[in-house]
Amino acid sequence: MNTPICDFVREYIRKNTLRLHMPGHKGVSLLGGEPSDITEISGADSLYEADGIIAQSEENAGSLFGCRTLYSTEGSSQCIRAMLYLILQHARQTGKKPLVAAGRNVHKTFLSAAALLDFDVLWLNPKENGSYLSCDLTAEELDHTLENAEEKPAAVYLTSPDYLGNTADIAAMAAVCHRHGVWLAVDNAHGAYLRFLENSLHPIDLGADLCCDSAHKTLPALTGAAYLHLSETANAAVGSLAKNALALFGSTSPSYLILQSLDAVNLYLEDYPARLTRFLEDVYALKNALLRCGYVLYGNEPLKISVDAKAYGCTGNALAEIFIPPSTIRSCPVI
Ligand SMILES: Cc1ncc(COP(=O)(O)O)c(C=O)c1O
């Protein structure tokens, strides 16, 4: 696995070139990262028209994720808007109405995208008394909704993992969607690591058409680093529009620090599965120890431990102080 963006910037720094270009810090440090913070100079490629080092690096990421993968320097937020734009373009191509069926626990970015792109939403609500942090919809319920929908949505949009550590049965949901001729898009902001489990639980591997991952949430990437992934089907239908879709919602000055971070993460991911498997054994043991101590846990997500503080009779903040008294926080290992 090579790291073309990091290599380019390292060489640029080594040459000590006079920086007659933006950014205005000219490589002089106030914070520490400035020497590596460049812009689209000759040879540095350009994120939204990539055909050089950024394109190579995105291909590396795609080979790790097993699908077409594009970089975002503005988080899953940017990818979510782009995904929805692509869904609407596909709807237009196929004569469908601009309607998306979405689990009611969507992140607020979905709502701003609905306002910006002017599509209608068919809400998939959680069961009575259910939390808006989750959406406990089954594949059978989704099937029933799609079967009886007056208007078939252009796509179903699910948030999985959710905020409480639950994952949806994406394989079953994708099968239902495809039976109805509807795309499945997944907000996998919290689940980039799912691809690297012994048996991948990444949405694209389970049949989703589009998904986004925040690299910065569960992988050691800088804040803002994220991926937009397209399945073969989605790539064939709207792949040529994907870069423009991201550009539509992004700055014309994407951060090269974040691009280098995504590039470096590719190398890191090469031997990540083995480390992740070992680490998950510890997480599993800790979950069991907590259960033995009487704690009530939520969710089925492998890497997340969600404790029901209310069942223990206290607030989340109070529980956090019991588990991790501030004086014991020293450093947190990266897997
Ligand atoms: C479920 C979910 N989706 C999307 C986002 C947005 O991700 P980002 O911060 O990478 O833009 C978040 C952020 O917390 C989130 O929790």
Image: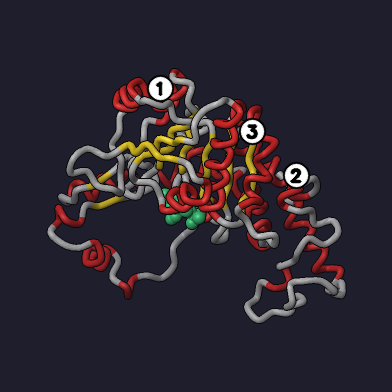
Instruction: Report whether 293 appears left or right of 60.
Output: left
Amino acid found under the numbered disc labelled 1? Val
Residue holding disc 1? 176
Q: Mark 2 or mark 3: name the one nearer the start of the chain.
A: 2
Tag 2 and tag 3, C-beta contact below 8 Å:
no
Sort mark 2 into few (<14), some (14-19) or many (20+) by Cα contacts within 10 Å: some
Residue 21 image offset from top left, x and y in percent: 81, 71
Quarter of the image with the N terminus is top right
Does any portion of residue 314 appear in the rendered image? yes
Position in image of residue 244 (x %, y %): 68, 45
Whichever of callouts 1 and 3 sits on the residue coming sooner in the sequence is: 1
Q: What numbered label is drawn on residue 56?
A: 2
Label 3 Cα crowd, 10 Å radius (few <14 / some 14-19 / many 20+) = some
Q: Which residue is located at x 62 percent, y 43 percent?
A: 270
* Side of 190 relative to 124 (left or right): right
Frontmost of labels 2 and 3 is: 3
- Disc number for residue 217: none
Name the outermost residue toward the top: 179
The residue that label 3 is drawn on is 238
- Residue 135 point in image, percent of width and height: 30, 40
State which quadrant residue 179 falls in: top left
